[in-house]
Amino acid sequence: MSKSSPITDIIFSLSTILEEENELHFENSLYSDIKVCEIAAKAIEFSFEHFKNKETIYEDYQYEFEVKITGIGLGIDSHLQKNKGNKKSNVIKKFVTDIINEEKYLAGRESFIFLLYILKMDNELIQIANDKKDFWKTPRIRFQLLYALYRRRINGFKDIVEDLIKNNPKDRELIKYAKKYIEQENK
């Protein structure tokens, strides 16, 4: 019988965790930044490979893996709330931007946009808001992008935000933060 590693054990249990809870929980809040990224990367790839069914429960997702990947990002956020030292980690920051830039994960990247706000990655947030025009058209991602820009008090996107209001008159939550963003920029 071969000895299993912590990573092998985690991968073995990922199917159950992701199937039942839709969020990755790190067993130890003291995991290093490298270990957090290692576990999250394996969980993301596992999700992408094993949850390709059409999504029918959650709004604005096409595939189940998008929900799972969003949950993995939320798991990283939970970990960062417990291990505040990892918030300064360049390893985690690079991992977050790498996931955001991986187009195959579709709307599953929304929680990683949220992590830009949590990690105070303002330059990356500005670059993504400027460069990834398709994000402004993707419902779950555009909300997180707007929210992150608003919470980080990053100005310069008033025209885009005004278009969001005009083009999404029924999205009350989006409009609420769009108006707050515009009000904040006008101060």
Image (cartoon, rainbow, N blue to C red):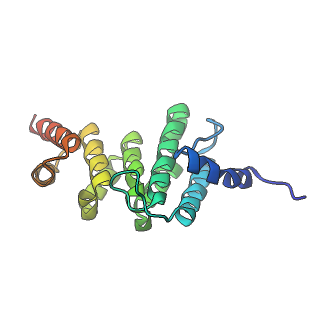
Instruction: Please state which of residues 86 and 9 is positioned toward the viewer in this rendering.
Output: 9
Instruction: Please state which of residues 90 and 105 is positioned toward the viewer in this rendering.
Output: 105
- Residue drawn at (51%, 44%), measured in percent from left and top? 76
Percent coordinates x, y for residue 67 in the rendering: 45, 53
- Residue drawn at (73%, 55%), measured in percent from left and top? 8
Quadrant, the N terminus: bottom right
Specify whether 127 is left or right of 169. Answer: right
Specify whether 53 is left or right of 161. Answer: right
Instruction: Please state which of residues 55 and 15 is positioned toward the viewer in this rendering.
Output: 55
Quadrant, the C terminus: top left
Percent coordinates x, y for residue 63 in the rendering: 43, 61
- Residue drawn at (27%, 42%), measured in percent from left and top? 147
Occupied quadrant, residue 44: bottom right
Percent coordinates x, y for residue 122 in the rendering: 32, 47
Instruction: Please state which of residues 127 and 142 is positioned toward the viewer in this rendering.
Output: 142
* Up/down of 6 relative to 184, above or below: below
Percent coordinates x, y for residue 132 in the rendering: 28, 63
* Up/down of 140 relative to 137, above or below: above
Specify whether 11 is left or right of 88. Answer: right
* Up/down of 156 relative to 51, above or below: above
Q: Which residue lies most toward the right here?
A: 1
Specify whether 114 is left or right of 1. Answer: left
- Residue drawn at (63%, 54%), measured in percent from left and top? 15
Number of callouts: 0
